[in-house]
Amino acid sequence: MSQANPVVIVGGGIGGLAAALALSQKGIASRLIEQANEFREVGAGIQVGPNGYRVLETLGIADKVAELAVLPDDLIFMDGVTEKQITSIPTGAAFRDRFKYPYSLVHRADLHSVLLEACRESELVQFQVATKVISYEDTGTSVNVFTDKGETFQASALIGADGLWSKVRERIVGDGAPVVSGHIAYRAVLPIEDVPVEFRRNAMILWGGPKCHLVQYPLRGGKLFNLVAVFHSDKYVEGWNTEGDRDELIKRFAGTCPTVQALLSKIDSWRMWVLCDRQPVKQWCSGRTVLLGDAAHPMLQYLAQGACMAMEDAVVLADEMSRANGWYAGAFEKYQARRYLRTGRCQVMARVHGDFYHAEGVVAELRNGMLAKRTAEQAYDGLSWLYDAVI
């Protein structure tokens, strides 16, 4: 299937690229418009659960991502104050037998580059960088897209994959600025040689502390070591990929165990971002315009599902559009009906997990006691709603 006017996708991140690739597999042409000077991704490691890996396979890129990823042996929760292991979820053969797909740790830039390469191999995907979409007009039969360069593109549809601060969302939802959580994340990636041997484990390890937590895991086949430190603070209102304040970091992790302190001391420079999300909504589309990924359902990172949900969106959206015979308004309604409750649950549960990780006092004791009694099978059952889903 093809059409005279391509679909315009605003935003060249993971969600936008996944949408372009998924549409190309259905024979639908698209034009990706990115405001940055190049298609690239900033950030550090991300976790791709079995549901996300299923999408990578659907998109035909699972093998290439696997070459750059790490498959951990366990997901481990540690008490960041007492230094005791609270629980461990094995992610080896039993996990893969249960969920059919592995748990993967991958650098965000690596996932982005594989998606970009796959899109570049398709004749159905066009690229435009250093361009902002400033407005659009839905005529009912097409969408006129206006850019800051004075260009007008006539599109068969418009997909807003323009992230947390989406301009397309402003037109469709109009719910103002994102919700600032009061949580700050510092991230850093080290060469594995810079990390003491005793800290090098093939696992995703989360150290939960009072109003803070630290995550560690290997990346890029074990060549890199990813650290993300998260803490509560009212010092920042917004910010992304800016230099972190080391004194603030040390202050917020005061009282944590020697291992956490040792890991934090290995980093000389941190990149910081303020964690934001929005309340779940069910209205993602208007006529021939639709939202995808963070533009539709931004979530805190505590469930490790932001990228996975965006890629799921892409596959479902392409599926509905391929069956629409050009009636994209109807396809978008069906797409949002299939997606809003699942993504809304992720948005809500991400907040719950954040409170869970950052518990203190009696609440932390209750958390630790509950998790310590849980078997691997019970842990798998608790994750089934997320990882077993058929999109």
Image (spheres, grey):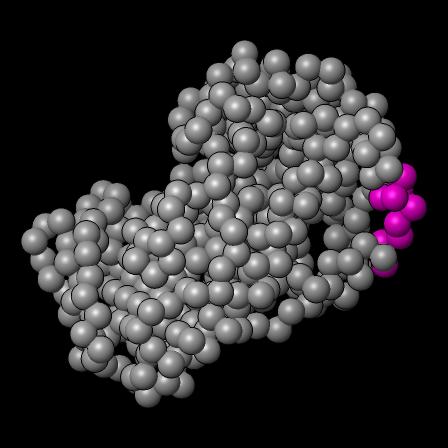
Q: Is residue 128 left or right of residue 260?
A: left
Q: Which residues are magenta?
A: 368-377
Instruction: Give the image location of residue 47, x and y in percent.
Output: 59, 48
| Residue 86 location, quadrant | top right
**Within the magenta stretch, is there residue 369?**
yes
**369 up-or-down from 211: above or below:** below
Q: Main secondary structure of the magenta part?
A: helix
Quarter of the picture containing the N terminus is: bottom left
Q: Which of the pair 345/382 is nearer the observer?
A: 345
Q: Is residue 87 visible?
A: yes
**202 up-or-down from 318: above or below:** above
- The residue positioned farthest toward the left in the image shown: 150
Q: Is residue 391 left or right of residue 349?
A: left
Quarter of the picture containing the C terminus is: bottom right
Q: Is residue 309 left or right of residue 150?
A: right
Instruction: Give the image location of residue 55, x and y in percent.
Output: 53, 66
Instruction: Give the image location of residue 255, x and y in percent.
Output: 73, 15
Q: Residue at x 26, y 51 (%)?
A: 34
Q: Residue at x 29, y 73 (%)?
A: 288
Q: Residue at x 44, y 29 (%)?
A: 237
Q: Is residue 86 visible?
A: no
Q: How many marks?
A: 0
